Amino acid sequence: KNQVEQSPQSLIILEGKNCTLQCNYTVSPFSNLRWYKQDTGRGPVSLTIMTFSENTKSNGRYTATLDADTKQSSLHITASQLSDSASYICVVSAGTGFQKLVFGTGTRLLVSP
Amino acid sequence: NAGVTQTPKFRVLKTGQSMTLLCAQDMNHEYMYWYRQDPGMGLRLIHYSVGEGTTAKGEVPDGYNVSRLKKQNFLLGLESAAPSQTSVYFCASSRQGTANYGYTFGSGTRLTVV
């Protein structure tokens, strides 16, 4: 069964600190892995998309890593800001034709002043 | 650019009532999708469309119907609402459904069925 598991479920950090969110997946056949940011009451917004051959990708203060061998990904947030408070969702794309997206349940991050 | 626009943003229905959720995109995307998001669960695909005039079932299609009469619009219908359909509904679009094309999501419709 295709699954995406994220940890922790929730996290509180102080403004300016760094944090790392984890994603483990069992999805086959793997196509790509995406990280989304979802603000409360809004739709998900794409942060990064990584294919099998990419092991790191950055988007400003967000850096995603991918280890396709262990089927793990992480999202590192540097120098957190209050606006980083949101849910972060790991999504794995499966298939070679039309791609099915398998969504994790997200990590809810709160950045405290 | 508006991106993906969903209407309405909130709605309360009584059990058995019907309604239609509207999704409009202005990016000329071929693919459109309807997802539902429930507490403690990842987004789940209800129906999708690979182009104007086409529709297909996703993971959880029961109780819903869709139509894509125009490329920019994707409608989700509930013919007889049930409390189990209380959820947040997201529409999304992508240029294609293959490879690494990103999805653009709308801001959601929060539906409560009482």
Image: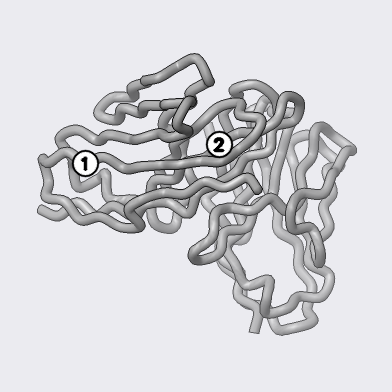
Q: Secondary structure at mark 2?
A: strand
**Mark 1 highlights which residue?**
A19
Marks 2 and 1 share the same chain: yes
Dot 1: within a 10 Å radius of its alpha carbon, few (fewer than 14), some, or many (20 or more) residues? some
* Quadrant in which residue A55 is drawn: top left
Q: Position of residue B114 (x, y in %)?
A: 64, 84
Q: Position of residue B28 (x, y in %)?
A: 69, 26
**Mark 2 highlights which residue?**
A92
Dot 2: within a 10 Å radius of its alpha carbon, few (fewer than 14), some, or many (20 or more) residues? many
Using residue A67 as the reference point, say whether residue A17 is left or right of it: left
Q: Amino acid at mark 1?
A: Cys
Report the disc number at residue B84.
none
Q: Please report whichever mark, 2 or 1, sits nearer to the chain's N-terminal start.
A: 1
User: Residue at (71%, 39%) from the top-left corner?
Assistant: B32
- Which residue occupies the foreground of this view, A8 or B73? A8
Using residue A30 as the reference point, say whether residue B107 is left or right of it: left
| Residue sitting at the far top | A53
